[in-house]
Image (cartoon, grey):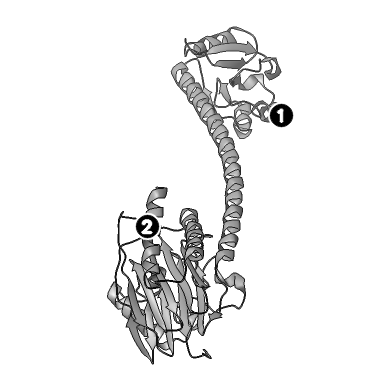
């Protein structure tokens, strides 16, 4: 089906010249209608071709208000020609009957530009609507993320809590509202306390959901534990969690360190899955990396995790850091950064001191600072960043 022809309105005094002008325009496959006044043209008229003599000079501005208009004249000396151009007409042409091809070409170009302008206006309107909708959805998502961050914050243990002479402190800064880093420290009974330190792959909501699963499973497993064979508990937890993550099919894995502190024997039983950097044990100004290695949790089925153990001295501080800390350290290689971390923890007496060394801002006393929206001192973190310390037993009265 052929598309309807564009309607062009010709304004001029009735007569042969107007008819000839209309015929000249019609050769361009345009529909043409002639009139003496613009108000006599139908609404669907797409463009006006007006002779300079047909329109009083004071009417040119109103003529161009709603449609594009082209002025024609038989002479360059026509005084109304300049007034018409100044009023905003798209173009002019002298002796249009002699330059019919040029006239039709100009008309076609004006119509094309008008269609493009209308299309761009519609696109801008649609874009404005989409942007408004996007802003609304982003605001809702931001509120959801903030609410999720608040809930995740409530899942963390209290800071500066002490069980049987061992004190736990930490600081966690997500790169987004939600974090893939998570930790916990719980008292089982007078003899044992249990802790874990996790870094789920990625960051944001999907990684944070895994931390919720981790919290639920570990709480359930802790209530099911009877306090027997503490040296086997960390390894069993990692194996069970490995299976749970694989069964969910969400494509997430984690590095994880699980420890059981035997307060009576002053011994740490632990297991780990691809923990980096390795936990650092500080005693009498000396730094020791805990031994052991294990596969990431949630990547491969049937993985067996090691059962490891080490003695805890009378006065110690155990440091656990997520790999986000390495981003804050100088050095071109991983080994250089790990050695720098060892040097820093040797000289630091707690989380606050290490934060200052890493230029991560001053520690606030509020619980809300435990999970920061952005780490102070950094406009944007490339990864979640978490620091955890366990120290003892110098305050133990036992």
Residue 359 seen anywhere in this rendered image of the structure: no
Query: Looking at this view, is 330 or 236 the one in front?
Result: 236
Is disc 1 placed on a helix, strand or loop?
Answer: helix
Q: What residue lies at 69% left-to-right and 14% top-to-bottom?
A: 40
Residue holding disc 1: 58
Residue 231 seen anywhere in this rendered image of the structure: yes
**Picture coordinates of residue 336, whole percent (x, y):** 29, 77
In the rendered view, would you say 304 is above or below 170?
Answer: above
Left or right relative to 222: residue 19: right
Residue 262: quadrant of the picture: bottom left
Disc 2 or 1, which lies upstream in sequence?
1
Query: Looking at this view, is 25 or 164 the one in front?
Result: 164
**Picture coordinates of residue 135, whole percent (x, y):** 59, 47
Q: CA distance from mark 2 to mark 1?
A: 84 Å
In the rendered view, would you say 27 is above or below 393?
Answer: above
Comparing labels 2 and 1, the label whose residue is closer to the camera: 2
Residue 132: quadrant of the picture: top right
In the rendered view, would you say 175 is above or below 103?
Answer: below
Q: Badge 1 local density, few (<14 within 10 Å), some, or many (20+)?
A: few
| Number of numbered discs | 2
Residue holding disc 2: 242
Is disc 2 placed on a helix, strand or loop?
Answer: helix
**Picture coordinates of residue 31, whole percent (x, y):** 54, 11
Q: Badge 2 local density, few (<14 within 10 Å), some, or many (20+)?
A: many
Q: What residue lies at 62% left-to-right and 11% top-to-bottom?
A: 34
């Amino acid at each position: 089906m052929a598309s309807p022809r564009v309607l062009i309105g010709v304004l001029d005094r009735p007569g042969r010249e107007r008819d000839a002008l209309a015929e000249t325009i019609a050769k361009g496959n345009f529909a043409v209608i002639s009139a003496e006044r613009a108000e006599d043209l139908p609404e669907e008229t797409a463009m006006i071709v007006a002779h300079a003599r047909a329109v009083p000079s004071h009417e040119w501005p109103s003529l161009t208000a709603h449609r594009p208009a082209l002025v024609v004249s038989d002479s360059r000396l026509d005084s109304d020609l300049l007034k018409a151009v100044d009023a905003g007409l798209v173009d002019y042409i002298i002796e249009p009957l002699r330059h019919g091809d040029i006239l039709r070409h100009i008309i076609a170009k004006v119509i094309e530009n008008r269609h493009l302008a209308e299309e761009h206006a519609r696109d801008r309107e649609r874009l404005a609507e989409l942007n408004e909708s996007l802003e609304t959805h982003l605001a809702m998502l931001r509120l959801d993320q903030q609410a999720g961050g608040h809930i995740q914050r409530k899942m963390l243990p209290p800071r500066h809590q002490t069980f049987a002479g061992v004190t736990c402190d930490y600081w966690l800064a997500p790169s987004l509202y939600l974090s893939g880093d998570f930790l916990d420290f719980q008292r089982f009974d007078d003899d044992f306390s249990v802790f874990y330190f996790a870094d789920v792959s990625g960051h944001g909501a999907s990684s944070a959901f895994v931390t919720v699963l981790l919290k639920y499973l570990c709480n359930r497993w802790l209530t099911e534990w009877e306090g027997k064979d503490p040296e086997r508990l960390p390894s069993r937890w990692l194996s069970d969690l490995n299976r749970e993550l694989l069964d969910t099919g969400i494509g997430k894995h984690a590095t994880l360190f699980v420890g059981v502190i035997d307060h009576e024997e002053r011994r740490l039983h632990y297991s780990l899955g691809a923990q980096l950097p390795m936990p650092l044990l500080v005693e009498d100004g000396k730094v020791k990396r805990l031994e052991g290695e294990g596969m990431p949790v949630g990547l491969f089925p049937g993985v067996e995790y090691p059962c490891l153990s080490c003695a805890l001295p009378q006065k110690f501080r155990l440091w656990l850091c997520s790999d986000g800390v390495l981003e804050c350290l100088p050095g071109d290689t991983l080994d250089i950064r790990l050695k720098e971390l060892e040097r820093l923890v040797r000289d630091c007496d707690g989380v606050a001191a290490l934060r200052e060394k890493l230029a991560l801002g001053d520690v606030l006393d509020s619980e809300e600072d435990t999970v920061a929206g952005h780490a102070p001192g950094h406009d944007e973190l490339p990864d979640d960043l978490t620091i955890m310390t366990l120290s003892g037993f110098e305050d133990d009265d036992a």
